[in-house]
Image: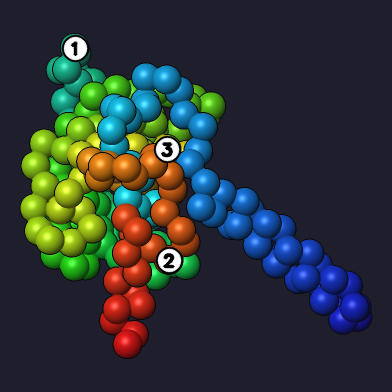
Amino acid sequence: MRNPYASTVAGASLAAILAGCAASNVGTVPVVPDNLKVPAGQTLSLVSRATGVQIYECSVGKTDPAKFEWAFKAPEADLFDLSGRKIGKHYAGPTWESDDGSKVIGEVKARDDGPDASAIPWLLLSAKSASGAGVFGRTKSIQRLHTGQTGPGRLRSHVLLLYRQALRGEANRPPIQGQVAGRPSLARKRRT
């Protein structure tokens, strides 16, 4: 016979652990290696969580045509704000596109293996192109941090930080939760 008290305690414990993990980094800029720091004069404009996959295809080996290997093809992920609401997508390019229509295509400037050697690398990217009037339209730099494990068929999760050019007198500070670049979030605009 199952003990209903034990099930309740176990469920409450799991909920508390997950809440602690989810809230521990809210509104903070993660510590990153020096080679992944954004250039001076840029300020944080968006913190996003991305969840998705890296798509690989089996191809003939580059060094030995008698062998096959997995070759990276493209990412495919959904982007979420800090409250968990879907705000966009990530795909080949690498491209990040917001539900507001803005998008940015990045170019890798630096990489670091991060603390987990089995995870996809942490990256610093510069905006090769940015378009639209929305949140991604003024992006200058992108950091991909706290990545998940790599390999075909594995679900990934990482933190995405977008930076824009700082306005005169503006400090390099993280946005207040629910805000993007000092403006009310799109979620609030849509609800009113």
Secondary structure state at the residue bearing disc 1: loop
Q: Residue at x 29, y 27 (%)?
A: 39
**Nearest to viewer (mark 2 / mark 3):** 2
Residue 106 lies, in percent from the top left, at 18, 38
Alpha-carbon span between mark 1 and mark 3: 31 Å
The answer to which of marks 2 and 3 sits earlier in the sequence is 3
Asked if residue 161 is positioned above or below residue 77 in the image, the reply reads: above
**Nearest to viewer (mark 1 / mark 3):** 3
Of residues 170 and 9, the one drawn nearer to the viewer in this rendering? 170
Q: From the viewer's perspective, is 187 left or right of 64?
A: right
Residue with the mark numbered 2: 178
Q: Is residue 71 visible?
A: no
Q: Residue at x 35, y 77 (%)?
A: 188
**Nearest to viewer (mark 1 / mark 2):** 2
Q: Residue at x 20, y 33 (%)?
A: 126
The amino acid at mark 3 is: Leu
Secondary structure state at the residue bearing disc 2: loop
Image mark for residue 145: 3
Q: Quadrant of residue 143?
A: top left
Question: Farthest residue toward the top?
Answer: 63
Residue 119 lies, in percent from the top left, at 45, 33
Residue 45 lies, in percent from the top left, at 32, 50
Residue with the mark numbered 1: 63
